[in-house]
Image (cartoon, coloured by chain):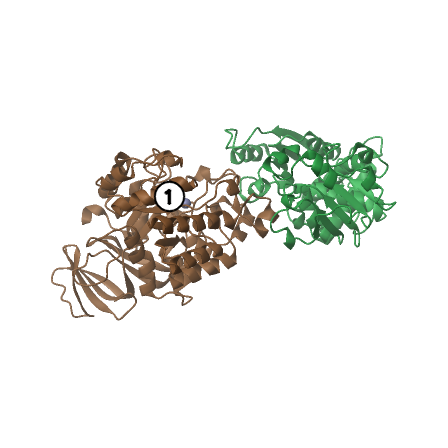
Chain colours: A green, B brown
Amino acid sequence: MKRHLLSAADLDLPDALLILDTAAELAAVADRPVKKLPTLRGRTVVNLFFEDSTRTRISFEAAAKRLSADVINFAAKGSSVSKGESLKDTALTLEAMGADAVVIRHSASGAPHRLATSGWIRGSVVNAGDGTHEHPTQALLDAFTMRRHLAGGVGDLAGLDVVIVGDVLHSRVARSNVLLLRTLGAKVTLIAPPTLLPVGVELWPCSVSYDLDSSLPTADVVMMLRVQRERMSAAYFPSAREYSRRYGLDVNRMKLLQPHTIVMHPGPMNRGMEIAAEVADSPRSVIVEQVTNGVSVRMAVLYLLLGGSELSDGSNGVPVSEGRPL
Amino acid sequence: MSFVLRNVRPLGGAEVDIRISAGRISAIELSGTIATDGAIEVLGAGMVLLPGLVDLHTHLREPGREDAETVETGTRAAALGGFTAVHAMANTDPVADTAGVVEQVWRLGRASGWCDVRPVGAVTLGLAGSQLAELGAMADSPAAVRVFSDDGKCVWDAVIMRRALEYVKAFDGVIAQHAQEPRLTEGAQMNEGAMSALLGLTGWPAVAEEAIIARDVLLTEHVRSRLHVCHVSTAGSVEIIRWAKSRGIDVTAEVTPHHLLLTDDLVATYDPRYKVNPPLRTAADVEALRDGLADGTIDAVATDHAPHPIEDKDCEWADASPGMLGLEDALAVVNTTMVESGRLDWAGVAARMSVAPAGIGRLSEHGRPIAVGEPANLVIFDPSASYVVDPNAGASRSRNNPYAGRELTGRVRATFLHGDPTVLDGELVARSNV
Ligand SMILES: [Zn+2]
């Protein structure tokens, strides 16, 4: 695996499986009375958030702390355009602090690539969501969740029918999921109004449909994406009500699902918009579990990016037996 | 001062000797037959001789952004690239929308002496698109402006565009349009297509360029004026312009070196060096542009040389300023993409990089035949010398060279401006020496 995790496309099948398997072993730690491993003691993980996302930051923070890393939270306001500190100067500051890994969240697509390839820092870069580009750890935690429920918690996701519904155009979650699910062998269908699909989506390794109802009966997973009401003002759809009627997952649509089908959402949800409260709170919903799994998957990513280097001398209590350095 | 150019090949033809005196070509004879007679000899060694290049689209940034470029540094870069005349774009600070500003730029060009500087006047006040600038005053000023453009901004309002096209007929002007429908390109970051979908960057659709060009050629036909289309970047634009020319509409068009060579897959690096407006397009567009340039649908190569200081590129893609350097490598790019592939001969290169742009800009001393009595605005080009582009080696004040690290073929060996060398042996000639 590469030194950075910038895109779900950075992961080939062995990499992806290694992360999922490692996450499964690390998940067991969460059940212990002491939820901490000494694995990354002395290592510094910086959470560099140019965009507010408390849930993602907390998840990475918990992951790093459970591996005993030192965590620095760096909430950078704005960007060079909005007269904040520039990405470059921020990066140089982090480098001076000796960051071993930088977890970056940014409103600009490609900001993690810039950080990783500009020569500003030496540490590993983990993309925690960049603009409308990607969010690879979200895709990993989604895959982890699907595997637990529908694949016995092991192996790949071959043959799984995954339906992703909503604002694909602006969704980093959708992009990362399409790439990772393809690697893991699942069959993906994107469903959205044509206005919320990017030009060029026809080249993606998935199918595309404008009709939700016809895709639901065969789905094993239905993943609802957040749709911002403000998209309405840019004429992506006529009204929240119409969107909800055509593309929202409500109780009636839920009845079309197979008994084993799970419902996912990356959060935060717009209840009543893309997903009805009854669906979000139903037994099919694994939305809360996605959050839990997020910590395990992010532990695995940090461990594999950082623990595989000079610290892995066998004395660090790593619970992974056959892990190879990524 | 007199010069004898030995063994040069005008437009790639047979080797001759050429004498330059009093700013003009005074003799063209068989190789080895012109006596030196106290003149300075320049050994051409079988290299290609072209009329000095003319750029229709140069951002010299002065006044206002002297941290990016000045008339002095920009024209040095022009001379090194083989240019003897450049059109300085109007989007300076203050905007070149008055006779005062265009005259200032014109005077700075005269003072620098590295090439002729022809200011482009803004079409509308402050490039704001709502009120015509004093086009007549700029035309009548010593700068004698003939090309008007709101480059960087599109004259999107159809009525303003119509009036501008009509108004400049009084002084043989031309409107050079940066064709970009503004609503279709709000927040646009790169070509809209497979790559923008993958990279999560807001798309700049080809139709936003093509729709404006289609509208403008029809307006031009209606009011019987003259239109020039800046930096054509899509296959569809080439088709529309081809159609317009077949109807006899007086439209000309330019393509940049970067749109002839680079494609939008480079954006996958998120390296803002590749951010430019209009954006890099697909390989199919590049093919159509090369075809259009070869068959004359596209009249001219124009650099859109757009210097930016390091901090404007050393950032996130979305925050970076669009634009690329172009003057110093333009001829090598055209050689690499058009001549080496057999699509254009040297007469064709002279037509597209000198004759046509000089004609569009109404320059009388440039784009002339290589003949006795003609002004000695000339460039000697070695078409076989390849080099790896080093952005730090350039004369531009900026470093945003999109070809950095790339190998290109062909180097400018000498440039003559009104009979005096600005470049010899590929190096600038100190102006005090001439
Ligand atoms: Zn332009």
Query: Position of A82 compared to A133: left or right?
Result: left
Q: Amino acid at mark 1?
A: Arg
- Name the image quarter holding residue B95: top left
Give the image location of residue A99, x and y in percent: 61, 35
How many marks do you count on the picture?
Answer: 1
> Secondary structure beneath disc 1?
helix
Question: Mark 1 vs ligand 1: CB under 8 Å?
Answer: no
For this orientation, the residue located farthest to the right is: A259
Q: Which residue appears at 46% of the width and 58% of the height?
A: B239
As displayed, is residue A289 above or below residue B74?
above
For this orientation, the residue located farthest to the front is: B222
Q: Nearer the viewer, residue B406 or A219?
A: A219
Ligand 1 position by quadrant = top left
Query: Position of A97 compared to A149: left or right?
Result: left
Please say whether residue A42 is visible from this viewpoint. Answer: no
Q: Chain of mark 1?
A: B
Q: Which residue is mark 1?
A: B162
As displayed, is residue B48 above or below residue B424?
below
Q: Which residue appears at 68% of the width and 54% of the height?
A: A205
Give the image location of residue B301, x and y in percent: 37, 55
Give the image location of residue B1, x and y in percent: 14, 54
Q: Which residue appears at 68% of the width and 50% of the height?
A: A179
Please say whether residue B13 is visible from this viewpoint. Answer: yes
